[in-house]
């Protein structure tokens, strides 16, 4: 009886051991044990820092941002064309008209310039009275002709005369110089009565000179406006 009971107990123990081996769970190795440093004996030489660092696994920090590839730059846009440059301004043209011997002639040209939208300034110099007056016959063709004319004047009773020898007045015949225009004109009348046509000329005086300065509003009309009277180019900075 005892033997039979012992056999049954042994059989039960064997079956339990076999079931434990078959159905025991598979355990994963502990992470702490994997990352634990290796034990070394005191008699072994110490490891270099680089070796220790290589043996220790550093866990990856998943919280760090993942580097993404930089986007490719967009192609450069062609520059937008700016406004077309303005045409350079047309240079102003100024003319000086004159001199005019009388105001009526200058006024006529002034009206024509104003009609063409020109800016006009009038100016001039007043007349200067002559210091004296001379009466003379114009230069003859040659010295011989001048001497022959002088003889005819003497024959007619004209004694106050002189034949000019050189200069711009060479071969002309001077017939007197007078301090007043009235005295010179009496001499002219006397010579005319004897058949000689003499001339009268002031000495030292000057006639009035009248001018017009104009800034042309229409540069293309320069040629046509310049025909109104004698004209010369003028620096527009001199416009008064």
Image (tube, rainbow, N blue to C red):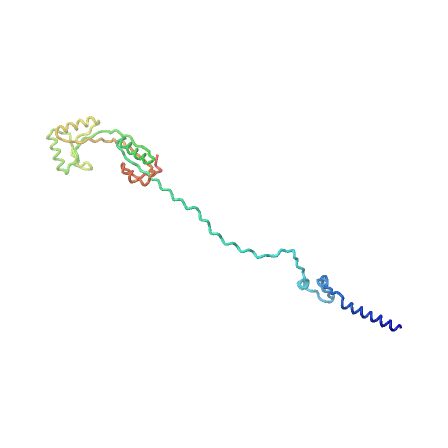
Q: Position of residue 218 (x, y in %)?
A: 33, 39
- Quadrant of the frame with the N terminus: bottom right
Q: Is residue 182 positioned above or below 45 on the image? A: above
Q: Nearer the viewer, residue 145 or 160?
A: 145
The residue drawn where x is 29% and y is 36% is: 97
Residue at the extreme bottom of the image, as rendered: 3
Q: Is residue 70 positioned above or below 159 on the image? A: below
Q: Nearer the viewer, residue 115 or 49?
A: 115
User: In screen coordinates, is 155 left or right of 34?
Assistant: left
Residue at the extreme left of the image, as rendered: 155
Q: Nearer the viewer, residue 216 or 203?
A: 216
Tell me which corner region of the image, top left, top right, bottom left or bottom right, holds residue 217. top left
Tell me which corner region of the image, top left, top right, bottom left or bottom right, holds residue 109. top left
User: In screen coordinates, is 93 left or right of 69?
Assistant: left
Q: Position of residue 211 (x, y in %)?
A: 29, 34
The residue drawn where x is 40% and y is 44% is: 86
Total marks placed: 0
The residue drawn where x is 28% and y is 32% is: 108
- Quadrant of the frame with the C terminus: top left
Q: Position of residue 214 (x, y in %)?
A: 32, 36
Q: Position of residue 203 (x, y in %)?
A: 23, 31
Residue at the extreme right of the image, as rendered: 1
């Amino acid at each position: 009886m005892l033997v039979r009971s012992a056999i049954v107990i042994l059989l039960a123990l064997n079956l339990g051991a076999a079931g434990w081996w078959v159905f025991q769970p598979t355990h994963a190795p502990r992470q702490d044990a994997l990352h634990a440093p290796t034990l070394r004996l005191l008699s072994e030489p110490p490891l270099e820092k680089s070796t220790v660092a290589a043996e220790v696994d550093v866990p990856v920090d998943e919280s760090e941002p993942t580097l993404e590839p930089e986007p490719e730059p967009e192609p450069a846009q062609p520059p937008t064309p700016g406004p077309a440059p303005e045409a350079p301004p047309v240079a102003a043209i100024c003319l000086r008209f004159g001199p005019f011997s009388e105001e009526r002639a200058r006024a006529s040209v002034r009206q024509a310039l104003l009609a063409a939208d020109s800016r006009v300034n009038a100016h001039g110099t007043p007349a200067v009275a002559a210091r004296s007056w001379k009466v003379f016959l114009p230069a003859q063709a040659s010295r011989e002709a001048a001497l022959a004319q002088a003889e005819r004047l003497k024959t007619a009773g004209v004694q106050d005369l002189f034949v000019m020898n050189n200069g711009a007045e060479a071969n002309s015949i001077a017939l007197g110089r007078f301090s007043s225009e009235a005295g010179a004109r009496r001499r002219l009348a006397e010579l005319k009565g004897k058949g000689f046509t003499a001339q009268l000329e002031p000495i030292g005086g000057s006639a009035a000179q009248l001018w017009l300065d104009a800034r042309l509003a229409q540069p293309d009309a320069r040629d046509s406006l310049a025909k109104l009277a004698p004209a010369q180019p003028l620096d527009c900075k001199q416009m008064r």
